[in-house]
Image: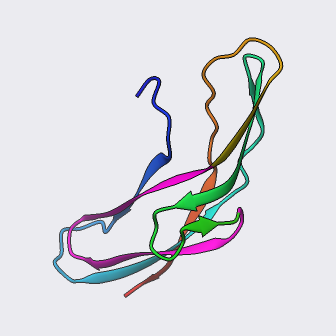
Amino acid sequence: MPGATGPAQFTLTYDRGNNGQVRLNIQLQLILLPAPVVTQQGVVARLTGYQTDLPGAARVAAGQPVLVSLPDCRQRLCTVSFRVGGRLDLERTSGGGRIDVPIPMTVSVLSIR
């Protein structure tokens, strides 16, 4: 949404590949990587001190693995949505405008039972 500020929202989706009704418990590992320093339109932005609404991971350091569960997955697509925010430090050298700070992450499947 243009002009919106606040935590970024993400959705992790696991595609079972079929419509079988067998219950799956899926464990994922999420790692938030350090956000790059962004310079746009005369503004330098640094995002640090990640915070999430994932259970057990309210504060997350860059590089720290976080366990994400998709319990009782019975549908073809199972999802979990979460938000990531943090401390945003801005330094204006000239101009100004919209700043987009990417939050890089990796996600790996640990287990499917």
- Left or right, 30 with respect to 74, comes to right
Where residue 48 sits in the image (x, y, percent)? 71, 52
Q: Is residue 27 above or below residue 95?
A: below
Question: Is 71 inside the magenta-drawn segment?
Answer: yes
Stretch in magenta:
62-86
Q: Main secondary structure of the magenta part?
A: strand
Q: Quadrant of residue 23?
A: bottom left
Picture residue at 34% right of the left edge, 83% below the top = 25
Image position of 39 (left or right of 24):
right
| Of the pair 23 and 59, the residue shown nearer to us | 59
Q: Is residue 23 left or right of residue 90?
A: left
User: Which of the pair 69/77 is nearer the observer?
Assistant: 69
Instruction: Give the residue drawn at x 80%, y 13%.
Output: 94
Q: How many marks?
A: 0
Assess whether residue 95 is covered by the magenta stretch.
no
Residue at image location 78% in from the left, 39% down from the top: 37
> Which image quadrant: the N terminus?
top left
Residue 22, position as x, y percentages in the image: 20, 83
